Image: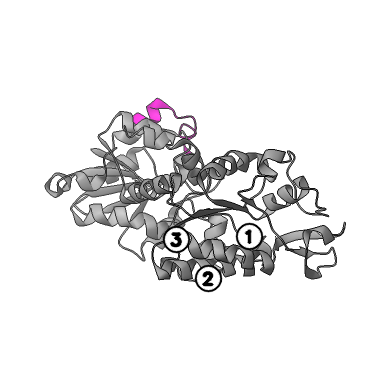
Amino acid sequence: MRCIDEIPVVELKGKRVLIRSDFNVPLSADGEVGDVFRLRRGWETIQYLSLRGARVIIISHIGRDPEQSIEPVARALKRFGAVIHVPDIVGAAAKGAAGAMRDGEILLLENLRRDPREKKNDESFARELASLADIYVSDAFAVSHREDASLVGVPKFLPSYAGLLMRDEISHLKEALNPPQPSIAIIGGSKFETKDPIIRLFLEKYAHVCVVGAISSDCLRGNGFPVGRSKVSEHAPAKDVCGNIHLLTPIDVTVERSDKQVSVKKPQDVLPDDKIVDIGPDTVAALAPFIAEAKFITWNGPTGIFEEGFISNTSAIAVLIAKRIEKGGAHCVIGGGDTIAALQESGVPEEKLGFFSTGGGAMLEFLLRGTLPAIEALG
């Protein structure tokens, strides 16, 4: 796999570069982009190309509704630099705009999913996208586990390179695959069956694996503790996972009764009317020495239901990680949209927490497989 910065600068000037970014960001009630984390991370490659005289054509999807326009992203990107939104993908308007570009200009084409051929990985659509440019750059790590035309089809028809974000994602996550010891992985989320493979892998590679979020209720239940009204998975974790000596489960939990009263309890004291909404402070304290001595930390998933306001323990762990990194000798990789959103509310600066991956599902799948379809397509 080659990175775009391996191309001599003189060979970029005047070239049309089709860059597949991931600007699938949520919009606020007024239809504007609120969180520019992904835009800021993706802008580095765009700016790199533009400053070297390339004619940059950005493609991305947004939202689940194919009719959703990507225009709000264009407006948000303008805080970083001049971007022209073209409300077309491969039609006459897109081809005309691409053909009329000047060196350094940046276009953002319309939502890729407006064309149903994108999700079908249709070869004709991939060819039409490729016809817009001279070079293809893959920088959409967060969707690289998908096999869409813009991700795995276009590289068949153009010289293809990884973007700077893609390169950095792969570099950091490869380190997470074989972490220096001692190490700790903190894994949250729901649907234990989807997390089971990565937990099993981490139990082999990490000194400690701590489960948080909804899947911690699955493990507590698997170890015989009551979980009340807590969200649990359809498939319970196996005994060889729940009982693994490297697995850390909460020693106290934050629960909410149906009348919204919140308290902290030991797992054995959870009542039928309780819903586990977070780990507890004793669990954070128990994790502190493992984090303090860790040389590598991987974190995916907030400790509690952050969308309902339960972020205090996520924030407390973030503080512990920041202190460990500040002392030197530790690396940390953090991923998952919910995790990053929760940490942005924690008050701990991103730069003090290590590397933030733009991927959630893509991050975990890469750690499981060591590659992804869109990465494989780059050769």
324 with respect to 187 (left or right)? left
Q: Earlier in the sequence, mark 1 or mark 2?
A: 1
Q: For mark 2, what is the residue?
A: 319
Q: Is residue 130 shown above or below 62?
A: above
- In this view, the residue in front, 137 or 188, is 188
At label 1, the amino acid type is: Thr
230 with respect to 273 (left or right)? left
The residues bearing labels 1 and 2 have C-alpha atoms spaced at a distance of 14 Å
Which residue shows up at 68% across the image and 49% down it?
215
377 with respect to 285 (left or right)? left
Q: Is residue 158 shown above or below 101?
A: above
Numbered range of the magenta stretch: 114-127
Quarter containing the C terminus: top left
Q: Earlier in the sequence, mark 3 or mark 2?
A: 3
Which residue shows up at 63% across the image and 60% down it?
303
> Is the residue marked by circle 1 packed among few (<14), some (14-19), or many (20+) residues within 10 Å?
many
Is residue 84 one of those drawn in magenta?
Answer: no
Regarding mark 2 in the picture, which secondary structure is present there? helix
Q: Earlier in the sequence, mark 1 or mark 3?
A: 3
Which residue shows up at 46% across the image and 31% down it?
117
Which residue shows up at 53% across the image and 45% down it?
67
Q: Horizontal and vertical percent for residue 270?
A: 83, 60
Q: For mark 1, what is the residue?
A: 303
Q: For mark 3, what is the residue?
A: 37
Question: Picture quarter containing residue 258?
Answer: bottom right
Q: Is residue 121 shown above or below 177?
A: above
Quarter containing the N terminus: top left
Is residue 118 one of those drawn in magenta?
Answer: yes
Q: Horizontal and vertical percent for residue 85?
A: 37, 53
